[in-house]
Amino acid sequence: MLDLKEERKYTRLRKMAQELHIPVPEAFWTLEVFDKDGKLLQRHHQRSHSWVRNAYNIIFCQLAAKNADDTTFGAGKLSCKTQDATVKFQDYPFGVAYRLFTHDGTGYACRAPAGEDTWGILVGSGTNAESFEDFTLQ
């Protein structure tokens, strides 16, 4: 569940950012476990603390309408890395689409169809410390 002390800090940060006209990205995740009949067994909701360069680059490209046209990945660059370490760049702002023109929304990178384990929201099981430069899960 959400930490109330932490959420009060985010409320102050959000207010200050609004006064300064600075966007502050926020993300949350929810985990739901259902039984075989579709009955909800467990639900967990919390703030995401796992920001990586790929996420910031995609958000910045969208907000600023800035092209992601650099062939290198790292500080000061607006490219993204795929799970196989391929650096992606293009002559238009990055989006989160994996496949275009899907009527059900599964073309967006966060909505992969059931059973897909190469894109979409993925969960790792490794124990290494998180890094801002991460582009794949353990």
Image (cartoon, helix red, strand yellow):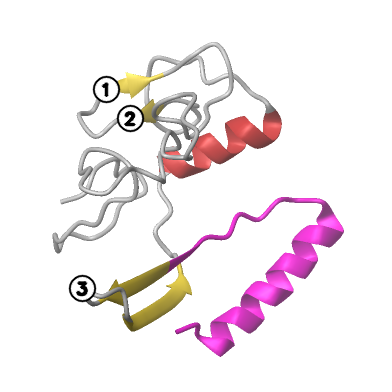
What's the distance in space between the residues labelled 3 and 1, CA to CA? 38 Å
Q: Secondary structure at mark 3?
A: loop
Give 103 or 29, whichever is nearer the viewer. Answer: 103
First to last magenta residue range: 1-29
Residue 84 against residue 43 in the figure, above or below: above
Foreground: disc 3 or disc 1: 3
Query: Would you name the residue on which mark 1 appears?
Result: 86
Q: Are marks 2 and 1 in contact (CB under 8 Å)?
A: yes
User: Quick one: label 1, few (<14), some, or many (20+) residues within 10 Å?
Assistant: few
Residue 71 against residue 10 in the figure, above or below: above
Residue furthest to the top in view is 91
Residue 120 counted in the magenta span: no
Task: Give the mark, 2 or 1, whose residue is nearer the N terminus.
Answer: 2
Foreground: disc 2 or disc 3: 3
Image quadrant holding the N terminus, namely: bottom left
- Identify the residue at image location x=55%, y=81%: 6
Mark carried by residue 36: 3
Using residue 40 as the reference point, say whether residue 60 is left or right of it: right
Residue 110, position in %: x, y? 41, 45
Residue 14 counted in the magenta span: yes
- Identify the residue at image location x=28%, y=75%: 34
What's the distance in space between the residues labelled 2 and 3, CA to CA? 37 Å
What's the distance in space between the residues labelled 2 and 1, CA to CA? 5 Å
- The quarter of the displayed image where residue 126 is located: bottom left
Residue 29, position in %: x, y? 43, 66
Q: Amino acid at mark 1?
A: Thr
Q: Amino acid at mark 3?
A: Lys
Query: Would you name the residue on which mark 2 appears?
Result: 81
Task: Give the mark, 3 or 1, whose residue is nearer the N terminus.
Answer: 3
Q: Secondary structure at mark 2?
A: strand
- The quarter of the displayed image where residue 66 is located: top right
Q: Are marks 2 and 3 in contact (CB under 8 Å)?
A: no
